[in-house]
Image (cartoon, helix red, strand yellow):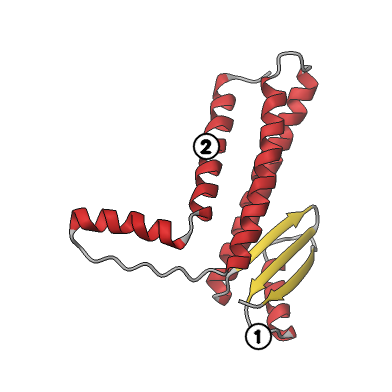
């Protein structure tokens, strides 16, 4: 049975996800206009330098849209009074697994960024981890280093693929 606290958590998580997607999809000119309006009121110069690959942004937005659709589906099951408690429990567990998967992907991206100074997109599905790196240079030594770095996060062996895309 769902309690109010769980429903609030899911609702707030959804709101945060929607706002994150909105922020990621803002184009540079809109962001620049917002920052100019803020700087006009403060009269302090502000410089913005966005360097993330548009490919990585596109992959993230696509993945976030898929996650959002899944979350909406699970939320509709949770809020439907005609569903059984078993269906609601399964939907809640799936929603929590989705949240955990998203956290795992972010942890891997952060680890790659910290240790190797590379921008990446990570997708985790069961024991398979797919990594897309935005870099001109494609070499097997770097790919092996990325695989070792990610595998060190796990006790159990994972199937890890690295794909390089031109920045």
Count every numbered label the image shows and give the total. 2
Relative to residue 67, is residue 165 depicted above or below?
Answer: below
Of the image marks 1 and 2, the number of the one nearer the N terminus: 2
Q: Position of residue 141 (x, y in %)?
A: 71, 85
Residue 135 lies left or right of residue 38; in this view the side is: right
Residue at image mark 2: 15
Disc 1 crowd rating (10 Å Cα; few below 14, some 14-19, many 20+) is few
Relative to residue 71, is residue 133 depicted above or below?
Answer: below
Residue 22 lies left or right of residue 89; in this view the side is: left
Which residue is located at x 55 percent, y 30 percent?
11
Which residue is located at x 72 percent, y 33 percent?
93
Which residue is located at x 49 percent, y 71 percent?
51
Instruction: Indicate the secondary structure of the residue bearing disc 2.
Output: helix
Alpha carbon of mark 1 to alpha carbon of mark 2: how far? 38 Å
* Residue 1 can be seen, yes or no: yes
Residue at image mark 1: 137
* Residue 104 can be seen, yes or no: no
Which residue is located at x 69 percent, y 43 percent?
98
């Amino acid at each position: 049975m769902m309690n109010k606290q769980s429903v609030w958590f899911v609702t707030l998580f959804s709101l945060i996800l929607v706002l994150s997607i909105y922020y990621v999809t803002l184009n540079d000119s809109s962001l620049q206009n917002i920052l100019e309006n803020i700087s006009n009121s403060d009269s302090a110069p502000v410089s913005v330098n966005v360097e993330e690959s548009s490919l990585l942004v596109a992959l993230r937005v696509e993945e976030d849209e898929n996650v959002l659709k899944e979350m909406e589906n699970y939320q509709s099951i949770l809020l439907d009074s005609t569903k059984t408690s078993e269906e609601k429990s399964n939907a809640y567990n799936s929603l929590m697994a989705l949240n955990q998967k998203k956290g795992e992907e972010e942890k891997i991206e952060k680890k790659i960024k910290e240790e190797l100074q590379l921008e990446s997109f990570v997708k985790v599905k069961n024991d398979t981890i797919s990594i897309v790196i935005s870099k001109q240079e494609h070499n097997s030594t770097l790919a092996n280093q990325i695989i070792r770095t990610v595998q060190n996060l796990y006790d159990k062996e994972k199937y890890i693929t690295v794909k390089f895309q031109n920045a």
